[in-house]
Amino acid sequence: MSAAASAPIRLAVISEGVNAWPLYVAEGRRLFEQESIAVEVTLTGSSTHQLEQLRSGGYDIGFQQSDHVVRAVETGSDLCIVMAQGHAPELSLVVAKDITSFADLRGRDIAVDGANTGYALLLRKLLAERGLSKADYRFVETGGSQERFDALKSGRCVASWLNPPFDRNLFAVGFGSLGTTTQFFPDYPGSIAACRRSWAAQNGEHLLAFIRAFRDACHWLRDPANREAAIALLPSRLNIAPALANKAFDAFVAKPLPSIDDAGLRQVIDVYWQAEGLQTPKGAPEKYMDLSWQARAALPADTR
């Protein structure tokens, strides 16, 4: 079946970033077409909007954080994690020039994607550990990385998690940092790909083809011989300096393939239960994740 003969897979991505590099590779090297599928990518700019549309069938596959799936399933959705999409990003807690400590965030506006999703939950946990209650600050739902970058640069908010190159671009004009996710949460899993179980059951071959193409892109990107070609893909997607692009490539090559396991997902479940104050028994990882799809789509290089 040709890619044109079937409806395209509707892929939702919250924001641009280095973590989406394998997607840029898959598109640029036509890996989806080689698997006889077409992929239509939408940059949603909001995890809340993306999750709503993914649940309702507006998108087929979404790249997001795993806590989004936990939340959706606990409120009646049949979403499930089918693939590890990215490494846990090293997000910087970027702050305005007048912020030098967590205490300085008291009474201030903090830009987040969704107030009850993703790294916002981790930020609440971090702030609580530093003595700040929910009443001590305001989360402003701003959107993806670009939107949060704009909120800080314009002065509408004084702090936010930001990934490269957005954090570096603010550091260059005098913004500071209170630390990184790697420092505060070293074992927290990275982003994942999720879809509805019902969609997967009806479109299994397309899902497997999608996973194969994406994993193939990860392998290609991890090959040092592809440095020049890989870095050339970034300028059209990200405002990133050549030196930072080279560092990003070195960091990607140094890491194993993105992965998620039961232990990592249990951390996410724990954070969600704590943030929501739930008293019901926690769900088991298999309630939210079905990695049999990733296993069935495995490439020979996956074992190396």
Image (tube, helix red, strand yellow):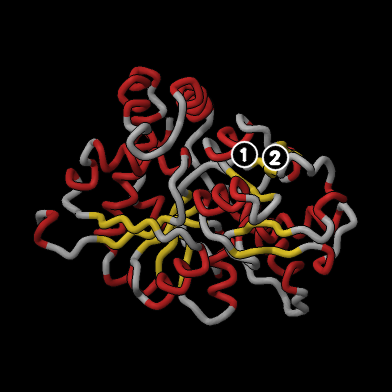
Residue on which the image places disc 2:
180
Which quadrant is the N terminus positioned in? Answer: bottom left
- Residue 120: x and y in percent read 66, 59
- Residue 164: x and y in percent read 54, 37
Furthest-right residue in view?
A: 131
Of residue 295 and residue 57, the one placed in the foreground of this image is 57
Task: Report whether 273 appears left or right of 255.
Answer: right
> Residue at 37% of width from left, 62% of height from top?
61
> Residue at 30% of width from left, 52% of height from top?
210
Which quadrant is the C terminus positioned in? Answer: top left
Query: Element at badge 1?
Result: loop
Report crowding for label 1: few under 14, some 14 to 19, many 20 or more residues within 10 A (C-alpha): some
Residue on which the image places disc 1:
90
Residue type at numbered disc 1: Glu
Task: Report whether 200 appears left or right of 206.
Answer: right
Q: Which mark is residue 227?
A: none
Are the two marked residues, 1 and 2, in contact with CB atoms closer than 8 angstroms?
A: yes
- Residue 115: x and y in percent read 64, 66
